[in-house]
Amino acid sequence: MSIIRNLSTRGKMVVLIISFSVFMTIVGGMGYISLKSSSEQLEAMYEDQLLPVKWINDWRQEMRAIDSLVYKMILNPVPDFLEGYKSELEARNLNAMQLFENLQLSNLDEEEQKKVQMLQSLVTQYRSDLVDVVSMVEDGKVDTAYTFYRATDKTLNWINDEQLSWANYLSDQADQMQTEYAKQAEQTILLLLIIEAVALILAIALGAGIARMISTPLRAVSQKMELLAQGDLSVEQVTHIGRDEVGKLGVAFNGLVINLRSLIEQVKVAGEQVAASSAQLSANAEQSAHATERSLGSVQQIASSSEVQTQRTQESVRVMEEMSIAIQRIADTASAVSESSIQAADEAQQGNEHIQSAIQQMESISTSVNQAAQLVHELGVRSEAIGQIVDVITGIASQTNLLALNAAIEAARAGEHGRGFAVVADEVRKLAEQSDESAREIARLITEIQQETTHVVTVMNDGTVEAQKGTAIVQEAGETFHRIVASSQVVAEQIQEVSAATEQMSASVQQVASSMDEMNILAAEAANHTQNVSGHANEQLESVQEIARSSADLNELAQDLQESIQQFKW
């Protein structure tokens, strides 16, 4: 099973289809071989035993007719009737010899060949005596002919005994063959039932195992994807990873979880840094605003306190430099987080492509299972054809039974001379009935095979339903990946907004720093340029207010980012 587990999904289904085909071929082949063997055995019995028995009985009937014609010639030697008797005698004699030749050309064993040699000499002697009797009757020596023919009764009785012995020998052989055929039929039926049961058990076990190999990992990945879609990053990684498409999907899912955890951690750290920097920036901006207001309120005192103003201006420059450094760190962190979010979105997109590939593979699996069901249906059609062959065998047995009935009727007409023939006819009838029973048993076996084939079709239909369920599960996983891709894109957009706001803040801080440098220069000349100081103080106040607004926006974005991160668990 480990080899099958490492196959692709398509390979698993090919193994399943081939296994079903092999099992059905074995069962069907054994059934066909059994039926063909039974047909050949029945045909051999008919040609080697039943037909020779019929020829022997017909030959005996012709011999009795010849004997009757000879007595008619002797008892009624009228010239007008002699020619008719002679013509009929010749025809009967030809028929008898033709039947004897048919027996000689049949499949004879050593015992039958001995009987043929014995009968050959007896028949030759009897025909020679018959010619002499006819000549005596034509010459008018009726009494001599009668006496001479009576002397040939021993030869005729000997021929009749040999014929009856031969017929009984063939009947005994037929009985033995029927016993052997019945035993072989029972063994074949038992073997077919065992093979069919083993094939069915193996097929069901293999189908259930492959279905479990496909559905169990898919169900595990689907459940973990649902947790991931709900923001639970603490989900455990997929452990049942094979080499098929489902295993590749599990590897992609594990990579996605790791990358998402790393991304969210980076975003969390960056968000905390942005929040801290924005708070510091707000405090510094407020401090600068208060200082500027105090400068505006003390414009009349600038001339007398220029040294103090210069110190405060230098302090403001230092604060602006610190703010510029902090904002630059925020910008660098936001840029790194933005790149990570873009990478996560790309990996989520790749996972979505793997899901689409798995959906196509499951559809291909469903098509393969339907083809396997069609093959099993064709096997059922062939089983029906085998049933028709059994009907033909049953017809042959019925015809043989009819021949036995006709033979029994002829034996009854023959009276005492047909008693042995009646015994043989009864044996032939029994053989025909046994052949008919065997054919009916084979027909019952074919019916059971067709029922099992129907059961296999049901199992294949269940496999199709399982494949469709797997397709639905993979489609749900695809929708989950779509939601993950959308969430990753939203996070990337928010991070890009943070980066843009940070760049705007950096520009504003640089502008404030430039203004503070100018204020430092103007502070040295504050005594003589009071009006210029007042104007620059107004510009500084506006810049500080702009920084405060940017800091508030940055703080709001940082809070939104923190709320988005809180949706995830890890």
Image: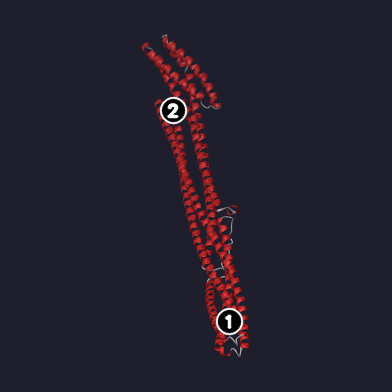
* Whole-percent x, y for residue 444 in the image: 46, 43
Residue type, label 2: Arg
Residue at image mark 1? 284
Residue at image mark 2? 419
Q: Residue furthest left?
A: 80
Q: Quadrant of residue 237?
A: bottom right
Q: Specify whether 277 is left or right of 391.
A: right
Between disc 1 and disc 2, the foreground one is 1
Residue nearest the observer in this picture, 124 or 303: 303
Q: At x 57% / y 60%, what residue is drawn? A: 252
In the displayed structure, 186 sits above or below 403; it is: below
Q: Specify whether 264 is left or right of 440.
A: right
Residue nearest the observer in this picture, 140 or 475: 475
Q: Is mark 1 on a helix, strand or loop?
A: helix
Residue type, label 1: Asn
Type of colouring? secondary structure
Number of numbered discs visible in the structure rendering: 2
Q: Is mark 2 on a helix, strand or loop?
A: helix
Q: At x 52% / y 23%, what residue is drawn? A: 116
Residue nearest the observer in this picture, 438 or 559: 559
